[in-house]
Image (cartoon, rainbow, N blue to C red):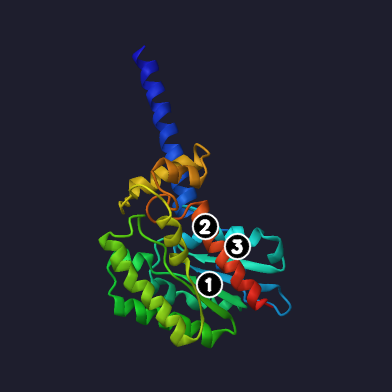
Amino acid sequence: MKKRIFIALCLLLVGVLGAAGTVGYLTFLRSPANPPAEACADGRAQGSPAVVVAAGASMTQGTLGADWVGALRDRPEHQGYEFVNAGVNGDTSADLLQRLDTDVVACRPSAVTLLIGTNDVRDGVPLNQYRDNLRAIVDRVKSGTTARIALMSLPPLGEDLNTEINQKLAGYNAAIKETAAQAEVDYLPVHERMVDLLRQRGGDPAPYDFSFPLAFGAATQHYLFGRSWDEVARAGGRELLVDHIHVNNRGGAIIVELAAQWLSVGKTT
């Protein structure tokens, strides 16, 4: 009897560890669809489809929260474009700057979106250093490509807009808008659109309270139990964020619409 219980417990443990490993891989280790390593390793041949590179961190990678790059790729009006997902979990502006040549410039893009800085805010990267990194990123893309460039403002951190971290975030978003104006590139007001939506909601918003267990729990609900990212967010009392950082489908749709409008105006070729 004891042997059977022991075997059952071992099998249960193996199952739990296997499920945890699956969630961990799908969320944190899996590459996004069409990453630069696959799309751009050998450069781009003449006559290839117009390339749109989305560069950023985990919010762009889209394995934890909505895959807004994939949603852009799936729109009928974008079938003539090749979308390269250059999002890397955990990246700061300094990390993106280091990989620009291989992950962005090598793709010979016609258009580049930049959504980077959330981890700079969370890691306490000084604002002046972030501003310098962002300008260096834009300057390198401009010097190495002929691409149109769009800088996206950063979504809120948690949905209580009055918290200290969101007050801190405001300075980084101001730097993004200022950099776009000075470098004469486009600016997409992701933060502003999300704030407008959050202010329409009644009740007390959830303050910023991100943790790795929370993120892992959100991913478990999605990948193991089949809940949509919107359902995961609602279960935590949130409108746009699954874990106080990463966007759900509703939040991702805001980014998609802004990026789609931008692409349509420029008619990337």
Is 269 placed left or right of 19 in the picture?
right
Question: Which is more N-terminal, label 3 or label 2?
Answer: 3
- State the image quarter where residue 98 is shown: bottom left
Query: Viewer-proximal residue, 4 or 208?
Result: 208
| Rendering coords of residue 60 (x, y %) | 49, 62
Q: Which residue is mark 1?
A: 113
Q: Is residue 246 above or below residue 127?
A: above
Q: Which residue is mark 2?
A: 252
Of labels 1 and 3, the one closer to you: 1
Q: Secondary structure at mark 2?
A: helix
Taking the view exactly as shown, the residue that stands out farthest to the top is 1
Q: Rounded to the nearest whole Å, what is the CA distance between mark 1 and mark 3?
A: 16 Å
Asked whether residue 195 appears in the rendered view, the answer is: yes
Residue occupying the point 52% across, 63% down: 255
Tag 3: residue type?
Answer: Asn
Of labels 2 and 1, the one closer to you: 2
Tag 1: residue type?
Answer: Thr
Taking the view exactly as shown, the residue that stands out farthest to the right is 47
| Rendering coords of residue 24 (x, y %) | 43, 47
Of labels 2 and 3, the one closer to you: 2
Residue occupying the point 42% across, 51% down: 201
Is 234 placed left or right of 52 in the picture?
left
Q: Rounded to the nearest whole Å, what is the CA distance between mark 2 and mark 1?
A: 14 Å
